[in-house]
Image (cartoon, helix red, strand yellow):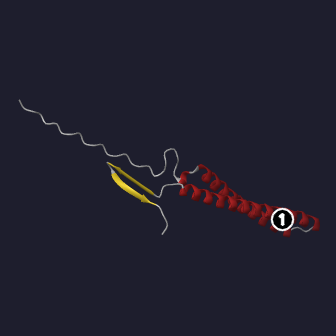
Amino acid sequence: MHASRTEPAPEPAPEPAPSVPPGRPPWHRDAAGGVLLGLGVASVVAAGALAGAAGWAHQDAARQDLHSEYHQRRGQTVALQWAAGSAAFVGAALLVGAALRYRAVRRREPPLGAWLSGQGAGLVVRGRF
């Protein structure tokens, strides 16, 4: 009687190690950072539009013949300039907030990650030089 020889089953490839804990998206996919960034960009764009409208209002005021109409248009110009400055300030604050949020979330990620799969392997190292 022949004894059949059984070969051991090959070990399955280890699962890739996640670079962030399960359930937590990577830093660049942080929802709060994305909202701050989007609102900051929108505020800066609105500030540019308001500044352009203030420029047009200033040109319109300069073309007025009556002193009262000039002052009315000049008042609109000043109001638009203040609105543009305020929107730019708020936009800049939101952009700084987004940068700080992304930085805080990124620091929570582990500094070293590795994975190995049937398609390849990788190593991620995060740090300062």
From the top left corner, tell me how far across and down residue 89 is, in percent.
73, 62
Please state, as top left, top right, bottom left or bottom right, where the N terminus lies in the image: top left
Q: Residue furthest top?
A: 1
Q: Is residue 115 left or right of residue 98?
A: left
Task: Say which element carries label 1.
Answer: helix
The residue at the point 83 percent across, 64 percent down is 77
Q: Is residue 102 left or right of residue 51?
A: left
Q: Which residue is mark 1?
A: 78
Q: Nearer the viewer, residue 32 or 76?
A: 32
Q: Amino acid at mark 1?
A: Val
* Crowd band around label 1 with a 10 angstrom C-alpha radius: few (<14), some (14–19), many (20+): some
From the top left corner, tell me how far across and down residue 75 is, in percent.
87, 63
Q: Image quadrant of residue 74?
A: bottom right
3 versus 67 height, above or below: above
Q: Residue furthest left?
A: 1
Q: Image quadrant of residue 59?
A: bottom right
Q: Nearer the viewer, residue 79 or 123?
A: 123
The residue at the point 85 percent across, 67 percent down is 61
Q: Is residue 91 left or right of residue 26?
A: right
From the top left corner, tell me how far across and down residue 66 is, in percent.
93, 67
The residue at the point 48 percent across, 50 percent down is 20
From the top left corner, tell me how far across and down residue 108 is, in percent.
54, 55
Callout count: 1
Q: Nearer the viewer, residue 73 or 104?
A: 104
78 versus 121 height, above or below: below
